[in-house]
């Protein structure tokens, strides 16, 4: 399945896909430039798997969400 196709089928006017930091930065510029009253989906595609030395989370999902929302307000 494809999140972008699902979003388009649900009426999202804009769907942007990013696979790395450069594309995320470009996507954020596009999102800021879009003058739309409709929803926008930014799909962040990632590599599957994990690092061998990956530790356990030290922050809650709520803390991560708040940090992300704060980042979006600043940028």
Image (cartoon, rainbow, N blue to C red):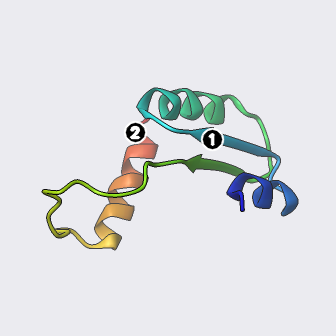
Q: In this view, does 40 lie to the left or right of 25?
A: right
Within the image, what quadrant is residue 10 found in? Answer: bottom right
Q: Pick the quarter of the image with the C terminus.
A: top left
Q: Residue at x 51, y 38 (%)?
A: 19
Say which residue appears at 42% left-offset and 55% top-offset. Answer: 48
Q: Nearer the viewer, mark 1 or mark 2?
A: 1
Secondary structure under the numbered disc 2 in the rendered image: helix
Q: In which quarter of the image is the N terminus?
A: bottom right
Residue occupying image coordinates x 42% and y 32%: 21
Residue 67: x percent and y percent?
32, 55
- Residue 37 vs residue 22, the one in the foreground: 22
Q: Cβ–Cβ below 8 Å for labels 1 and 2?
A: no
Residue of label 1: 17
In 3D space, how far apart are the residues under numbered discs 1 and 2 (Cα atoms)? 22 Å
Identify whether 20 is placed above or below 60: above
Above or below 71: residue 53: below
Could you say where residue 37 lies in the image, as x and y percent from the top left? 80, 48
* Foreground of the two, 75 or 5: 5
Residue 11: image location, x then y, percent: 86, 58
State the residue position of label 2.
74
Image mark count: 2
């Amino acid at each position: 399945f494809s999140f972008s196709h699902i979003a388009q089928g649900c009426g999202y006017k804009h769907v942007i896909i990013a696979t790395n930091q450069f594309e995320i930065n470009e996507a954020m510029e596009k999102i800021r430039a879009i003058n739309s009253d409709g929803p926008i989906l930014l799909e962040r595609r990632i590599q599957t798997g994990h690092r061998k030395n990956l530790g356990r989370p030290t922050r809650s999902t709520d803390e991560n969400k708040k940090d992300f929302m704060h980042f979006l307000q600043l940028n």
